[in-house]
Amino acid sequence: METTVKVTCETTPYLIVNDDLVLLFSSYARWSSIDMSSTNFEEIMVKHNMHEKEEFKSIKTLNIFYQAGTSKAGHPVFYYIARRYNFIYSIIAPVVLSQTAEDGEIEVRILVGIGETNGDLLIYHVILTLKPFCHAPFELVVDFTHTCSDNRFRTEFLQKWFYVLPEVAYDNIHASYIYNCNGWVREYTKFHDRILAPLRGNRKLIFIEAPTRLNDFIDPDQQKLPGATLSLDEDLKVFNNALKLSHKDTKVAIKGTTYVATVVRYDRRRTEVGTRDGAQVRATTEGVRRRVGPTAIQITSAEKTKVLSHSVLLNDVYYASEIEEVCLVDDNQFTLTIANESGPLSFIHNDCDSIVQAIIHIRNRWELSQPDTVTVHQKIRPKDVPGTLLNMALLNLGSSDPNLRTAAYNQLCALTATFDLKIEGQLLETSGLCIPSNNTIFIKSVSEKLATNEPHLTLEFLEECIQGFRVSSIELKHLCLEYMTPWLANLVRFCKPSDESKRQLKVAQILEQLIILTIEEVEMYPSIQAKIWGSIGQVPELIDMVLDSFIHRSVTGGIGSPMVEIMADTAVALASANVQLVAKKVIGRLCRVVDKTCVSPCPMLEQHMMWDDIAILARYLLMLSFNNCLDVARHLPYLFHVVTFLVCSGSLSMRASTHGLVINVIHSLCTCTKPSFSEETQRVLRLSLDEFSLPKFYLLFGISKVKSAAVTAFRSSYRHASERWFGNEQQRSFSGNSQTDREQLSLNSLEVVTDALLEIMEACMRDIPECDWLQTWTSLAKSFAYCFNPALQPRALIVFGCICKSITDQDIKQLLRILVKALESFNDTVLLEALVVCLTRLQPLLRPESPIHRALFWVAISVLQLDELSLYASGLALLEQNLHTLDSQGTFEEKTLEQVMMATREPLEWHFKQLDHAVGLSFKCEYSS
């Protein structure tokens, strides 16, 4: 039997009643332009029997406006719930309108709804509700909780309220209580200041900032605000004295609310009606029984602001479903990303960590309360329609149902014709077309052509692809990856500096959604890595933004969390197509973060506020270091610089990761083709690989107790979608705070590691003409050696002393100045030891005629006189090196040691007297002794 599928695409206004869509073929739009009185308006409505229309009854069920209870003054009270009026757009999925069994014809219509809750009918409903009461005093409660632009009245409709409502209603209103006024309401009243001028400063307006205040006017048992509004003030966790950062910093209080709404139970063959937020909810599904638990955070201003000339405390409410991300910037600052906000909200507070944890808890509870089988689709705007329908068509072309494949093909034809999409005549709508199930190549070719010819659809199309991906079968997910990949390169078009910031923000949101997809889709993980991130890696202009998103997400997850492991893995996929750029970006970021530790130095690197960033980026380096994804020929000095700072730092897993990084870097040098190394250099590299795997080097790297460094380095790796907000167990393995497995790094151990790395570098440099690796590494070490940083300066001094090949008198004098300052405070013996070791290493490089050679003798003697056990070995080594150097220069051939040194001492005698007195020595009298 032949089957004919007819596909049409229509655009029509609609009315939303909770989850039901009631289509309107409205003829009432013309009324908005007619100037009429309240009487005329009501007469027209009665004439058309509007009170009997289904759409009018639907508005009543929304409970936007209703009467309930009385005030303490005995007046009836009316309620207007602003968030229930929706100025909104959406889409209706394809529906089978008819199917004839005899001829096999199926009619499928794509209905796209574009419109708003009918405002004229809302006014009529308000008039009818007020009519029995408005000739006597009455009171009104306006609930602005969570009101936003979706709930606004357009300017022309706002004006209509003032001349269509009966004048007697305005005269008899005793008081209007404005509950939970927020920032959006303030801006809306400013924008419509001229229209709302009659309300400015009106004494009948009373702004209510807490339920207890409303109790002053209406008894609690007479109050009929929605349960969702009242529940905001239950089970509160309040953080006072926060500072919201903006163009005008504002002092606020942050409140976390967790509450449970009405339970709606669903049976397999039964539909029940429950009530949530005062409105009817009707739904049918299969085998689901869940508690829907809305949760929210509130940002309440601590300082009053003017709204309609009244002083008001604003209260912005954000539901858990709107929380996209919360990120701890440092101990005193965090950012909160909310859906549909123009940018992240930044706050300063003394207890940011507790606030962030509370917000994460709210989000987690909301996620856990959501039914697994129910997908909530985002609102669709008119400009989203082509991208949405395109994804729908391409995805359904891969269906196992032949009828659906044919319908999808004809939908694609109608779509390209309706929106004039350039497909170069490849499509022709046909009835009875037989489309094979294996048509992936065709689907991909169509997508590639559209991606090239219609790049403006990119953002909306990719958003819909990601949305549809989540609810598709495994087979269709693979298909989705195939046809969405060609569009990824177009993202760069929306990241240019000249572009609107909103478009750039949209790209960032898409990247964030792709990251979430990577985390959650465990079965599709390898395919997503190869298809999505491998493709994005081919677009150099996107690398910075992508790495920003990766690192931001990693920091949010915390050291050692599954998030870090997944993002580091994904960085490898990103680098597969662009090794040089990704390696340069990651290494450069790590070097900059290490540089920042000099701004607010700490005794230990693990205690620094930047430690999490350092440890996370070091993890990225480990993942990228295999198979030369770090491009070691270009970055070897920077890698060795980082290694010497991180060796034996952090937890056991972190220390094993640093060791693994060194092994992988040497391995990359052995296996890389450019540059090519001589047989002798290869021999040195292979010997170094063996040497670094010896127990001796395990000890130097602080992993002497482990059997396998590789196993320990990857001990924290764990991947599961449900862990994306957690990971505390993993964090412990990387936090660096555990003292049970801690091994201290001696400066002598760092010397050995540095010498081994130097040997590798020098062997490779012999095969590379004009190689500046060592010069670069020396410059990096020198910059830290002369900069105060208790955690890194001693290490930098050791490295500088080991790798430096030339030195000037000025350099040594600078080191001596640092030594003098360190001796004055005498609170960092490690720094003193590092300075002495550095001077010992550098002295042979000084020019022979330098007067500093002889002065260093007395420096060494002074170090020995300090009577500090930890400095004795280094002081003695400096003395030995000094005498050896002077002897090799022939200093003692004509004069004795006593004559040379006492002559050097004479100008400095005053400085040495105190030290000599303290230890009971006199070099004038007892030199020979």
Image (cartoon, grey):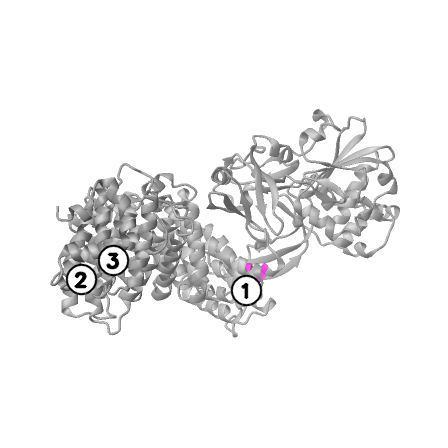
Rounded to the nearest angstrom, the CA distance separating label 1 from label 3 is 59 Å
Residue 889 found in image quarter: bottom left
Residue 102 spot, x, y in % from top left: 55, 56
Q: Does residue 791 appear in this view?
A: no
Rounded to the nearest angstrom, the CA distance separating label 1 from label 2 is 52 Å
The mark nearer the N terminus, 1 or 2, is: 1
Residue 761 found in image quarter: bottom left
**Label 3: few (<14), some (14–19) or many (≥20) C-alpha neighbours in 10 Å:** many
Closer mark to the observer between disc 1 and disc 3? 3
Contact between marks 1 and 2 (CB within 8 A): the answer is no
| Drawn side of residue 223 relative to residue 415, left or right | right
Label 1 SS: helix
Contact between marks 3 and 2 (CB within 8 A): the answer is no
Point 12% across, 46% down: residue: 929
**Label 1 amino acid?**
Leu
Q: Does residue 207 appear in this view?
A: yes
Q: Which residues are magenta?
A: 384-389
**Label 2 amino acid?**
Leu
Q: Which residue is mark 3?
A: 801
Point 73% across, 48% down: residue: 189
**Label 1: few (<14), some (14–19) or many (≥20) C-alpha neighbours in 10 Å:** many
The magenta stretch spans residue 774? no
Residue 685, which numbered label?
2
Q: Is residue 542 above or below residue 767?
A: above
Secondary structure mostly seen in magenta is helix
Point 48% across, 58% down: residue: 396
Residue 447 spot, x, y in % from top left: 47, 66
| Drawn side of residue 349 relative to residue 302, left or right | left
Q: Which residue is mark 1?
A: 457
The residue furthest left is 893
| Drawn side of residue 91 relative to residue 584, left or right | right
| Drawn side of residue 631 relative to residue 192, left or right | left
